[in-house]
Amino acid sequence: MKKLHIPKIKAKPKDYSKLPWTEVLRDTYPTHKALKIVESGVPIEELKDYLFAENLVDFRKAGLITDVLKNELGIVRNDNEILLVINVPFCECKCIDCKRNLYQRASTKDAYLYYFDALMKEIAQAREIIKKKCYIVKSIYFKGNLLALDEPELEKLLNSCAYTLSEVCIELGNLKFVSKSKLDIIKKFNHARFIVNALTFNTVTLRKLCRHYEFKDVYEYYKLIAKYGFDLTINLVVGLENEKELQLSRNLKLAIELGASCIDLYSRFCPNNVKDDLTDPQGIAYQRHILEFANEFLLKEGYQPYYLYCTEVNNGCFENIGFALPNKKCKLTEDLVCKVSTILGCGAETDSVIVKNLHKTRQTLTNTYDFGQYIMGIDELLDKKSKFFN
């Protein structure tokens, strides 16, 4: 019998020009709208299919929303728990579009010690507030570059905010501040998580950002952090400086090889940058494509999404997602994104926020962004803060 020739049917390319969330879920926090659907009577177990069938949401995005919402519903909201946020605003080089007030440690000279003294005053007051209000310190977050401090100041600072069972998170913009002696000091006080704002490992892109180093220059510092057993979060930007799938794939593979238990993906720019929205239809479609590529890549590697929010909502509506290995999510990042806990901010460019979850209220007191104004106005700030938390 003559064998029949059956032509293969080619899969139709996915149309990334369409908004995957649809208008129903188009929001900075798509899970907030999904929660209303669950509260209307749709079981959470059926939410993925419901969003796909009834709201015409892209099936992968429906799954993403459902997974993140399940995690959000499990978050404990205790008004007695707080985040202690401490800013050490030093860097070696700042990205070209960064809007943070960061200072070169070498150029601050005597001002470095004046800033440290002012910071210690504010932390001393924070301890009194915590004691008076019977707060439980859930997480301690060192913004900026804690390791830019000299060893005596580093040990003094850590000693002043050593709270039992608190998650300790240390932001790192430049790994060249890492040294064995400083990691020894941190290990002595607590197990910590390092949050590295890598953004990319691509040399060409790093140069465009005015980061004057290459991946090979900082590789040894990543390995040193891993040797101490610290947890590691690596922040990467999807679509940064027109990086394509090849560069993104390499970034994700390197982050996994370096031992990142959390990989946070930001769309087009990190939270500290300000750029115009993407309006080119082809650019929007491609950004959606590589975001899906990144999401699928990490899901296949065993990472799970635990937070989600969108940027450029009026145009592309691109997702920013936190991925974590099972039972390894960063509670601090989850808390900050979901706006769960009261925040006690210390240092320039920090906010103190009183959160009342039952009443759904938030009050904010913002410290000055300026390094010098913070030092000169510390006594006035302490007076304001005392009244704020009274």
Image (cartoon, rainbow, N blue to C red):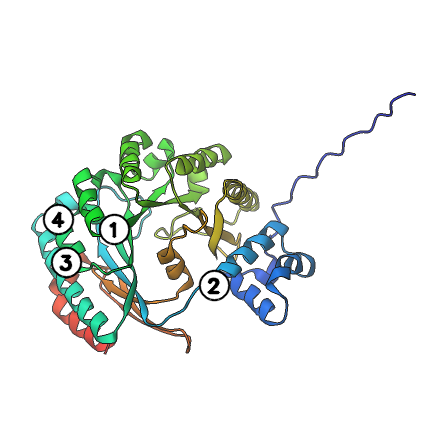
List x then y, in percent, for residue 303: 48, 45
Across the whole image, how many numbered discs are drawn on residues? 4
What residue does disc 4 label? 108
Query: As shown in the figure, which amino acid type bears the numbered disc 1?
Result: Gly
Q: Residues within 10 Å of mark 3 (few under 14, many from 20)?
A: few
- Label placed on residue 74: 2
Q: Quadrant of the N terminus?
A: top right
Label 1, label 4: how far apart the Cα atoms are = 15 Å
Q: Residues within 10 Å of mark 1 (few under 14, many from 20)?
A: many
Q: Is residue 55 above or below residue 272?
A: below
Q: Earlier in the sequence, mark 2 or mark 1?
A: 2
What residue does disc 1 label? 144
Between 118 and 344, the one lying in front of the other is 344
Toward the right, the furthest residue is: 1
Query: As shown in the figure, which amino acid type bears the numbered disc 2?
Result: Gly
Q: Earlier in the sequence, mark 3 or mark 2?
A: 2
- Foreground label between 1 and 4: 1
Label 2, label 1: how far apart the Cα atoms are = 30 Å
Query: As shown in the figure, which amino acid type bears the numbered disc 4?
Result: Thr
Between 40 and 274, the one lying in front of the other is 40
Q: Residues within 10 Å of mark 2 (few under 14, many from 20)?
A: few
Q: Earlier in the sequence, mark 2 or mark 4?
A: 2
- Label placed on residue 372: 3
Q: Are marks 2 and 1 in contact (CB under 8 Å)?
A: no
- Residue at (49, 59) in percent of width and height: 71
Query: As shown in the figure, which amino acid type bears the numbered disc 3?
Result: Gly
Q: Quadrant of the C terminus?
A: bottom left
